[in-house]
Image (spheres, grey):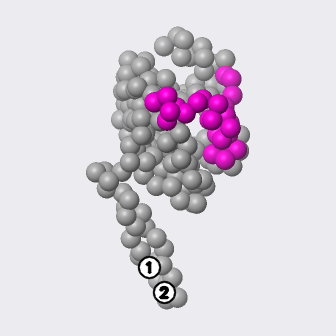
């Protein structure tokens, strides 16, 4: 990842804001299970961004909520099913959804489809280490208990959702 400093237009105090440019060939990609990839794009105090790629049959992300961050989803390809509180919504290519803090949510591609989705958290919170931990769990190099132990650090709190379980079972 490279950064580029640029001046804010019209600002004569000569303060610089850091731009972030991520080239596809330079982005780190982690594997979250056999059917999901996460391309790490940016992890700053202001926001964290990744591109999630879901192959057919991907379970996606289980039901969870965040206490400090809003999570935004923009479907760039395919169709996604998303748990939003107690309902399931379907997002098509081009659709956008903002999930505020404390709202249980989960996501997976629609049955028999593949999808890509830009995921952005604001504020950011050094979340890339969370995605790397997911990959280590998938590879058997870390235990699932470590995910539970990091819920406060990464603001990722798993919950049980009968609505989501039923949606996945009826896939």
Label 2 residue SS: loop
Residue 84 seen in render: no
Q: Label 2 neighbourhood size at 10 Å, few (<14), some (14-19), many (20+)?
A: few
Along the viewing direction, whichever of 152 and 120 lies nearer the viewer: 152
Question: Where residue 92 sits in the image (x, y, percent)?
Answer: 42, 32
Question: Where residue 103 sits in the image (x, y, percent)?
Answer: 68, 37
Residue at 49%, 28% (x, y): give it.
Answer: 140
Q: How many marks?
A: 2
**Location of residue 44 with respect to 146 vertically, above or below:** below
- Read off the residue under disc 2: 14
The part of the chain drawn in magenta is 136-161
Mark 1 and mark 2 lie on one chain; the one further toward the N terminus is 1
Q: Label 1 neighbourhood size at 10 Å, few (<14), some (14-19), many (20+)?
A: some
Along the viewing direction, whichever of 161 and 37 lies nearer the viewer: 37
Label 1 residue SS: strand
Tell me whether circle 1 and circle 2 mark residues in contact (CB < 8 Å): yes
- Read off the residue under disc 1: 7
Residue at 42%, 51% (x, y): give it.
Answer: 41
Residue at 62%, 35% (x, y): give it.
Answer: 147
């Amino acid at each position: 990842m490279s950064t580029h400093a640029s001046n804010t237009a019209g600002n004569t105090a000569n303060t610089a804001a850091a731009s972030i440019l991520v080239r596809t060939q330079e982005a780190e990609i982690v594997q979250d299970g056999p059917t999901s990839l996460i391309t790490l794009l940016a992890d700053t105090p202001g926001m964290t961004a990744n591109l999630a790629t879901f192959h057919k049959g991907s379970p996606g992300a289980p039901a969870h909520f965040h206490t400090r961050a809003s999570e935004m989803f923009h479907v760039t390809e395919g169709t996604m099913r998303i748990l939003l509180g107690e309902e399931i919504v379907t997002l098509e290519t081009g659709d956008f959804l903002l999930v505020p803090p404390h709202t249980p949510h989960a996501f997976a591609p629609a049955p028999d489809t593949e999808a890509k989705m830009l995921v952005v958290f604001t504020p950011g919170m050094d979340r890339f280490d969370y995605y790397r931990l997911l990959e280590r769990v998938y590879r058997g190099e870390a235990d699932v208990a470590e995910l539970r132990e990091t819920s406060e650090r990464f603001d990722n709190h798993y919950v049980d959702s009968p609505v989501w379980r039923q949606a996945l079972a009826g896939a």
